[in-house]
């Protein structure tokens, strides 16, 4: 799809700042980046630094969720949706009583941690504040957050989880002799092997892996080979049953360290967050509609727009932190095996966040700024759900936002 010329943005009427008082104090500057090399700005662009001090660890996640359950007087409910191969619980936290449902995941890639931090903050905030705006939101929306979907990978500070193909075959004897799934990585840096969990989903929520389907390829659905993706699928099915539909599924990621916007008034600005709708191939995923008629790409773009407008509105369009753009989405881009795609094919809106940087390339200041930006975007979306604003947006306005250089770069 061609990119219309970016125009001045208006923001959704009610922003997270106004309603929920997200603290933005002190978040007015970020390091500047060179625009000479789009997508690879120098200066802010560090690619190697393994220090991950200051980020929430798996044991700290358990402690924090326990505390929130205790102090929220029953408003926050934390529970396990799966046990990983290394024996860790994949924890979910639920808050709110509304009949609109948002399912939000963080750290499906273990070295992308902003989602963990922002979701813990959001659940804590919604579970502890007594103000009228918060109570109104919670009466309209139920938030189910899975802050750390891949705790095994997070503890190793790596993208994939921590399980070998032989372990998977031992759990699925019908796969004996089949080639490993294409998204299996043997011999990773820190563990013997693991899976890119964000390729392990299938829109057929009853799918059972068979040897004949392996190894698959990038555009095809995944195989639900891992406890983490199975647990999220089961949670989605349960919510679908309880509420009739899951309004939106959001997945929080990091996009790497070197990204700036190109095009329009924000040209050259360091990206804060890019947002996306599901990558399901040409003609807006039309080929899937016969089998999955509930797919609604425009709906996903409306929800994405509520995030973008909310961040832009909260920071002010001139702030460097309002560097909000569209994530990589050339027309043929197709990843049916991503969780967001599988759930979108079942009728949910689906929004991807990609903050600038990788968690191990952030200093403490950048960590705080990016976490707050994600928090602002998510709360803006929840607010727009609660007051109905999200339904009044024009999904085509999504394309008014700039990209960060990908449409001038070869695939
Ligand atoms: Zn990621």
Image (tube, rainbow, N blue to C red):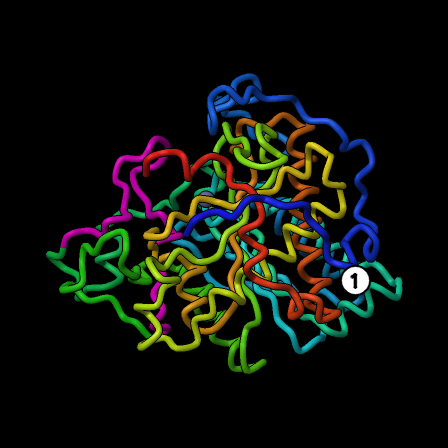
Say which residue appears at 39% left-offset and 60% top-offset: 227
Work out whether residue 134 can be spotted.
Answer: yes
Let me know if residue 277 is in the magenta part.
no
Horizontal placement of 18 versus 154: left or right? right
Q: Residue furthest top?
A: 43
Q: Secondary structure at mark 1?
A: loop
Residue 102: x %, y % from top left: 60, 66
| Magenta-highlighted residues | 179-205
Please name whichever residue, 53 or 343, is drawn nearer the observer in this view of the structure.
343
Residue 182 drawn in magenta: yes
Side of 249 where 72 appears, left or right? right
**Cβ at disc 1 under 8 Å from ligand 1:** no
Whether residue 359 appears in this view of the structure is: no
The part of the image, by quadrant, that contains residue 406 is top left
Q: Check the picture and name the quadrant holding the C terminus.
A: top left
Q: Residue at x 73, y 73 (%)?
A: 140
Please give the residue where the numbered disc 1 appears in the rendered image: 72
Residue at coordinates 71% horizontally, 56% vertically from top-left? 380
């Amino acid at each position: 799809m061609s990119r219309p010329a970016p125009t001045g943005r208006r923001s959704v009427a009610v922003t997270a700042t106004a309603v929920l008082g997200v603290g933005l104090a002190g978040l007015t500057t970020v390091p500047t980046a060179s625009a000479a090399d789009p997508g690879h700005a120098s200066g802010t662009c560090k690619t190697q630094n393994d220090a991950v001090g200051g980020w929430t660890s798996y044991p700290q996640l358990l402690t924090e969720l326990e505390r929130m359950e205790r102090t929220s007087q029953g408003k926050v409910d934390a529970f396990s949706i799966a046990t990983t191969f290394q024996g860790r619980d994949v924890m979910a936290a639920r808050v709110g009583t509304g009949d609109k449902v948002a399912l939000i995941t963080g750290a499906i890639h273990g070295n992308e941690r902003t989602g963990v931090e922002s979701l813990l903050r959001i659940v804590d905030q919604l579970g502890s504040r007594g103000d009228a705006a918060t109570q109104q939101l919670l009466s309209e929306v139920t938030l189910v957050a899975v802050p750390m979907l891949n705790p095994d990978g997070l503890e190793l500070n790596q993208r994939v989880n921590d399980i070998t193909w032989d372990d998977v075959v031992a759990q699925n004897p019908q796969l004996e002799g089949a080639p490993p799934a294409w998204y299996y990585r043997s011999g990773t840096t820190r563990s013997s092997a693991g899976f890119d969990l964000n390729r392990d989903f299938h829109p057929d929520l009853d799918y059972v892996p068979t040897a004949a389907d392996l190894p698959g390829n990038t555009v095809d659905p995944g195989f639900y080979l891992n406890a983490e993706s199975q647990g999220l699928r089961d949670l989605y099915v349960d919510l679908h049953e309880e509420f009739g539909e899951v309004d939106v599924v959001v997945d929080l990621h990091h996009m790497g360290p070197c990204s700036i916007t190109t095009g329009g008034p924000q040209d050259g600005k360091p990206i804060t967050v890019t947002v996306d709708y599901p990558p399901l191939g040409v003609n807006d995923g039309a080929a899937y509609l016969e089998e999955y008629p509930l797919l609604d790409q425009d709906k996903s773009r409306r929800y994405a727009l509520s995030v973008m407008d909310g961040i832009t509105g909260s920071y002010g369009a001139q702030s460097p932190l309002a560097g909000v753009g569209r994530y990589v989405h050339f027309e043929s881009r197709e990843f049916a095996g991503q969780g967001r795609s599988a759930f979108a094919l079942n009728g949910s809106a689906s929004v991807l966040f990609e903050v600038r940087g990788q968690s191990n390339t952030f200093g403490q200041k950048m960590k705080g700024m990016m976490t707050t930006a994600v928090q602002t975007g998510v709360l803006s979306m929840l607010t727009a759900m609660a007051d109905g604003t999200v339904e009044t947006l024009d999904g085509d306005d999504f394309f008014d936002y700039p990209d960060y250089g990908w449409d001038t770069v070869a695939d």
